[in-house]
């Protein structure tokens, strides 16, 4: 009595599968996976704004995105990347996944604000200690819509990568 509900994580396999369905624009498969995951995360019947009380920010954002609630997903993920105290362990260990999700949101929406946020996040993880790899992360499919922009190209020059993902001498 009076206890907070447990915080749950989407298993990595399911998280990656959901991202795959979103990238391939397979709404039927992503909807089916969301229906499977919501009971596991104890999210059935909850309004989207309550997801954060039951799931880590990254997972809540992925579920919101899969449900087509891009604005709410963007707000949640943007706040998670800007505020390390929201979930410090996730921020320290998986900040590059936040950038990937922001890139995916931009790929889906083409909203300039989301693209700007994705690039700022990517710059952060590529220029500070993180789990991101400059020869790999910028070339993941979630950043396809940003790759030809002048801002992305400038970032790649800044971190010493060329357009193929190879590190320049």
Image (spheres, rainbow, N blue to C red):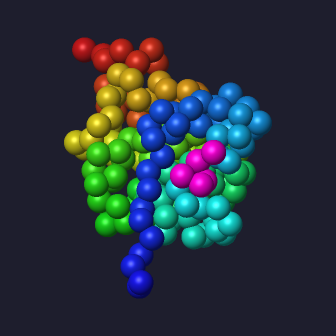
User: Disc count in the image?
Assistant: 0
Identify the image quadrant of residue 96. top left
Q: What stretch is highlighted in magenta?
A: 36-40
Report the side of 141 relative to 25 (left or right).
left
Q: Between 34 and 3, which is closer to the camera in this rendering?
A: 3
Residue farthest to the front, as pictured: 1
Q: Between 36 and 109, which is closer to the camera in this rendering?
A: 36
Q: Residue at x 49, y 64 (%)?
A: 54
Residue 129: horizontal and vertical position, in percent?
A: 22, 42
Q: Which quadrant does the N terminus fall into? A: bottom left
Q: Residue at x 72, y 43 (%)?
A: 31
On whether residue 82 falls in the magenta region, the answer is no
Q: Is the magenta stretch mostly helix, strand or loop?
A: helix
As drawn, 70 above or below 46: above
Q: Which quadrant does the C terminus fall into? A: top left
Residue 123 seen by the camera: no
As drawn, 12 above or below 92: above
């Amino acid at each position: 009595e009076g206890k907070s509900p447990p915080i749950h994580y989407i298993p990595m396999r399911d998280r990656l599968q959901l991202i795959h369905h979103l990238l391939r624009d397979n709404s039927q498969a992503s909807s089916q996976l969301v229906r499977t995951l919501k009971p596991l995360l104890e999210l059935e019947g909850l309004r989207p704004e309550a997801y954060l009380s039951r799931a880590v920010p990254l997972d809540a954002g992925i579920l919101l995105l899969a449900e087509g609630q891009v604005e709410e997903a963007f707000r949640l993920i943007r706040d998670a990347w800007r505020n390390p105290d929201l979930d410090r362990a996730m921020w320290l260990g998986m900040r590059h996944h936040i950038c990937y999700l922001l890139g995916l949101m931009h790929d889906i929406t083409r909203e300039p604000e989301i693209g700007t946020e994705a690039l700022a996040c990517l710059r952060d993880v590529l220029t500070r200690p993180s789990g991101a790899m400059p020869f790999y992360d910028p070339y993941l499919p979630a950043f396809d819509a940003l790759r030809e922009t002048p801002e992305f190209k400038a970032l790649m020059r800044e971190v010493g990568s060329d357009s193929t993902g190879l590190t320049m001498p």
